[in-house]
Image (cartoon, rainbow, N blue to C red):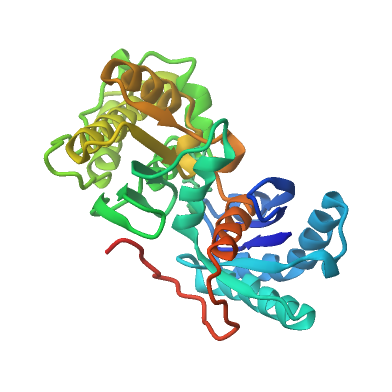
Amino acid sequence: MILGIETSCDETAAAVARADGAVLAEIVRSQVETHARYGGVVPELAGRRHIETIDQVVREALTRAGIGPHELSAVAVTGGPGLIGALLVGVAYGKALAYALRIPLFPVNHLEGHLCAASLGAGAVAPPFVALIASGGHTNLYHVKTWDEPELLGRTLDDAAGEAFDKAAKMLGLGYPGGPVIDRLAGEGDPERAPFPRPYPTCEDLNFSFSGIKTALLYYLRDREAEGRSWHVPDVAAGFQQAIVDVLVEKSLFAAKRCGVRDVVVTGGVAANSQLRARFEARGRDEGITIHIPPVGYCTDNGAMIAVAGARLLREGRVASLDFEPRADWVIGG
Ligand code: KG4
Ligand code: ZN
């Protein structure tokens, strides 16, 4: 049994998985209420909330799994990237628990955790595949040849896709986090009635850029306001969302063709987006590429992906050590 702990941003999460990767129990405690009134995550508050919550969350996960701490054979904890004050809480807790129980502790890279979430859905996926991780802090495309060897093909040069959703929602007065509310409103709107330029669409370059579309939205709203015209928020949400979704889908499929793989994994908070999921499935079918998107709860931050990543490290007989520090900027794949 492996305990997975995740505290890299604004979710305090823990899960128990078996060594074969089956998830027995998981708890995710969101801090959205703490940060909503500030319009984004306040790092210092995130760290404090993790301290208040972590012990309770771990105990609940163990209770739900029907085991006591002594039945654990390892602890896996997110070691980075993320907010340093938030990471420190999970890492300190994980170290203390592993030391007290005399069991190994595995630091897990948060992005590798998101990749591992691919095997939490229906049907396992094995390398080689292309993976898109689109979250509030990252938009990365990888060629995963083996689990240990993700090669970075492209990344955002400025804002992450989730950050673009969050900033757009702020401009439209829709609150935080922006992704889920834009997703919901877009379902009631017509993207053709508020078309936005595709941000950085050249497929030959697998990097992304989402700061331009944010400015396009700002000008759209400002021009309309100056002309005394109103706007239909669902149409704007739909147009904005479609521009981002199109670029994420087309670049990922292009990357798959370039790498000669037939499987694409899509994960991270933005992979919870309903339009993104539908468009990936449809375009994947057109191109003969199998799309793997975890269930929504495994796209956003969770402890199960960390426990499953830890289970793999344990199976591979990796050496674990208490002697590591969390790293806010821990990159994988170059
Ligand atoms: O992976 P995640 O939970 O945390 C990070 O590692 O960043 O991703 C959070 C991001 C936020 O920017 C949020 O707005 C976005 O994922 N998100 C969505 C949706 N649900 C969450 N973006 C678009 N559509 C959604 N349904
Ligand atoms: Zn994440």
Of 231 and 271, nearer the camera is: 271
Which quadrant: the C terminus? bottom left
Q: Is residue 197 above or below residue 2?
A: above
In percent of width and height, residue 219 lies at 25, 36
Q: Residue at x 28, y 26 (%)?
A: 224
Of 239 and 276, nearer the camera is: 276
Q: Would residue 177 be seen by someone viewing this image from the given angle?
A: no
Q: Residue at x 29, y 15 (%)?
A: 286
Q: Quadrant of residue 195?
A: top left
Q: Is residue 229 above or below residue 270?
A: above
Q: Is residue 104 left or right of residue 293?
A: right
Q: Is residue 131 above or below residue 327?
A: above
Q: Quadrant of residue 259?
A: top left
Q: Is residue 123 left or right of residue 241?
A: right
In percent of width and height, residue 34 lies at 66, 56
In percent of width and height, residue 16 lies at 73, 55
Of 154 and 223, nearer the camera is: 154
In percent of width and height, residue 64 lies at 84, 50
Which quadrant: the N terminus? bottom right
Q: Residue at x 24, y 45 (%)?
A: 208
Q: Would residue 25 be seen by someone viewing this image from the given angle?
A: yes
Q: Residue at x 72, y 83 (%)?
A: 99
**Number of callouts in the render?**
0
